[in-house]
Amino acid sequence: MLAWEVRPAGVLARVERPVPAPGPGELLVRVEACGVCRTDLHVLDGDLPPHRPAVVPGHEAVGRVVDAAPDVSGWATGDAAGIAWLRHTCGTCADCRAGRENLCRASRYTGWDADGGYAPYATVPAAYAYHWPEQLDPATHAPLLCAGIIGFRALSRAELPAGGVLGLYGFGGSAHLTAQVALARGARVHVLTRGADARRLALELGCASAGGATDAPPEPLDAAIVFAPAGEIVPVALAAVRPGGTVAVAGIHLSDVPPLDYRRHLFHERTLRSVEANTREDGRAFLAEAVRAGVRVHAVPYPLDRADAALADLRAGRFAGAAVLLPGPKSPPGGVRARASW
């Protein structure tokens, strides 16, 4: 099968690989769509240190179950399955026991520790796969599995009050989904981002305003989320929130934050928070809310054989919204056992 793998020096290489076999506790999924996430760029560029040589990136994959290990239950052949970033936690550490599995130090991730969805087939531990809502089209909604989920957790971390005013700094794949959730909850949303296309999309979605990345919003913010991987935006966002407000930083990688002025940026009980991955409960809750709220993904399709172009366009900011890789028609993999359910 055609797949893409990360090589040293930031090279994304097109290769031929055998169809993987599911290991213990795993499903084999025929991928119908895979979102292209900025985290894939961080893996490619080495911003995230390599965890697996020649890893296949991609952690926003949706497809159909075609096989499973003998010890898997709760899944049937043909079930729609979502493969997301979080792939394994220990289940026994203090954080896991407290419902904070996103902080488990033994956690592992799809497209970083294990091969992901930049291929026609991928495996996933059944306990970490999502039962994908049939109302959501994989070709347009696959980015919900990371861009959506991480924005959902960031919104929670930002502690936006009911009917409050939210600022979003950066408006790419994750932010344009978070904006829709906030708007559906009755918030007023102001977008601050450098891209003209992104600002237009923000207004089309119903945001109250859209300005430049370092502009002051038209009113004080109750909360803000920084999606841009630019540390220099953090003090800008802190200065824009009202006393008692919170700024959540949603990215897995951020350039250095410049020195903060205590009275201007942190005084009056302003709070600065980071966001790390997500729990499986975050994912389940978000997918349910996305269906209820009718969240739309501004999806830009690319065939799987142009994954390198999709990442290059993401890096250059050539599109608003989120890119989605589409593997296209595939024949059944050789050696797959036909079973009705597990």
Image (spheres, helix red, strand yellow):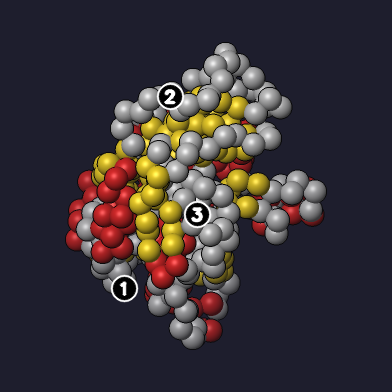
C-alpha gap between disc 2 and disc 3: 23 Å
C-alpha gap between disc 2 and disc 1: 51 Å
Q: Residue at x 60, y 27 (%)?
A: 68
Q: Earlier in the sequence, mark 3 or mark 1?
A: 3
Q: Amino acid at mark 2?
A: Pro
Q: Earlier in the sequence, mark 2 or mark 3?
A: 3
**Disc 3: CA contacts within 10 A as few (<14), some (14-19) or many (>=20):** many
User: Helix or strand or loop: what does disc 3 sit on?
Assistant: loop
Residue 65 visible, this angle: yes
User: Helix or strand or loop: what does disc 2 sit on?
Assistant: loop
- Mark number, residue 55: 3
| In the foreground, 4 or 216 | 4
Q: Nearer the viewer, mark 3 or mark 1?
A: 3
Cβ–Cβ under 8 Å for marks 3 and 1: no
The spot of residue 170 in percent (x, y) is: 34, 62
Residue 178 visible, this angle: no
Instruction: Give the position of the C terminus as an image quadrant.
Output: top right
User: Helix or strand or loop: what does disc 1 sit on?
Assistant: loop
Q: Is residue 305 above or below residue 327?
A: below
| In the foreground, 43 or 337 | 337
C-alpha gap between disc 3 and disc 1: 36 Å
In the rendered image, which residue does mark 2 sit on? 332
Cβ–Cβ under 8 Å for marks 2 and 1: no
Q: Nearer the viewer, mark 2 or mark 1?
A: 2
The spot of residue 326 in percent (x, y) is: 32, 38
Instruction: Give the position of the N terminus as an image quadrant.
Output: top left
Q: Earlier in the sequence, mark 2 or mark 1?
A: 1
In the rendered image, which residue does mark 1 sit on? 214
